[in-house]
Image: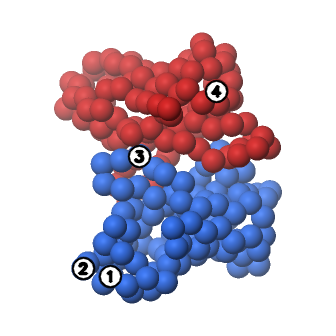
Amino acid sequence: NAGVTQTPKFQVLKTGQSMTLQCAQDMNHEYMSWYRQDPGMGLRLIHYSVGAGITDQGEVPNGYNVSRSTTEDFPLRLLSAAPSQTSVYFCASSYAPGASGGYEQYFGPGTRLTVT
Amino acid sequence: GNSVTQMEGPVTLSEEAFLTINCTYTATGYPSLFWYVQYPGEGLQLLLKATKADDKGSNKGFEATYRKETTSFHLEKGSVQVSDSAVYFCALIVRQLTFGSGTQLTVLP
């Protein structure tokens, strides 16, 4: 049972480069989310999705794009990386609110991104 | 908006000491409350949860009670172990999860 997987684990980018962080889950969860974790700031929501084809912005969406073409995958794209995007990125998934076990989010192991 | 305020760390305790990490929240509607734990180099794991007022969540010796009157969800453990060293996050959910800033706990042998 893989749960939530993320690739890569580590990445170094130069300012202006683009890249995609991958996230996949095998639990048939409707909800998927991307967070960034910065020291002393907890986790902040970047984008989320309530199902295939549906995405919405979270607290800190600027500089990031997402799409959700399948239930399993929810990639996060950085179109032009900036040093302010240096962070640890976590993907999470859960059932829809109200469903049995709903609201409990399952987190991936994270991607540590450095932008120089 | 929704927000979570938790006790600032770091917290350093000796093994077998009593632990309390304070957490208070502000929310519209009726949130569910959570404690997540993050061990070094790993993602977050759900530690315990409570979905309505006066519910007590418990797991691995940790407990927290949903107190609506004081809008609090303090985490407690009677006797901590070295293996409890981690970062602890209080969180609430109405539509999306809102996290506190985390509390680093170090338990010394």
Mark 2 and mark 1 lie on one chain; the one further toward the N terminus is: 1
Numbered disc 3: secondary structure: loop
Q: Is residue B6 left or right of residue B80?
A: right
| Label 1 SS | loop
Query: Chain letter of disc 2?
Result: B
Query: Which label number is shown at residue B43?
Result: 3
Gap in angstroms between the C-alphas marked 3 and 2: 25 Å
In space, the residues marked 4 and 2 are separated at their CA atoms by 42 Å
**Could you tell me the amino acid type at mark 3?**
Gly
* Amino acid type assigned to the residue bearing label 1 in the image: Glu
Tell me whether circle 2 and circle 1 mark residues in contact (CB < 8 Å): yes
Image marks 4 and 2: residues in contact by CB distance under 8 Å: no
Residue A7: image quadrant is top left
Q: Position of residue B74 (x, y in %)?
A: 58, 75
Residue tagged by mark 2? B109
* Residue B15: numbered disc: 1
Foreground: A73 or A34? A73
Q: In screen coordinates, is A58 left or right of B53?
A: left
Q: Is residue B109 above or below residue B40?
A: below
- Residue A28's disc is 4
* Of pointers 1 and 3, the one earlier in the residue sequence: 1
> Could you tell me which residue is drawn at 58 percent across and 73 percent down?
B63
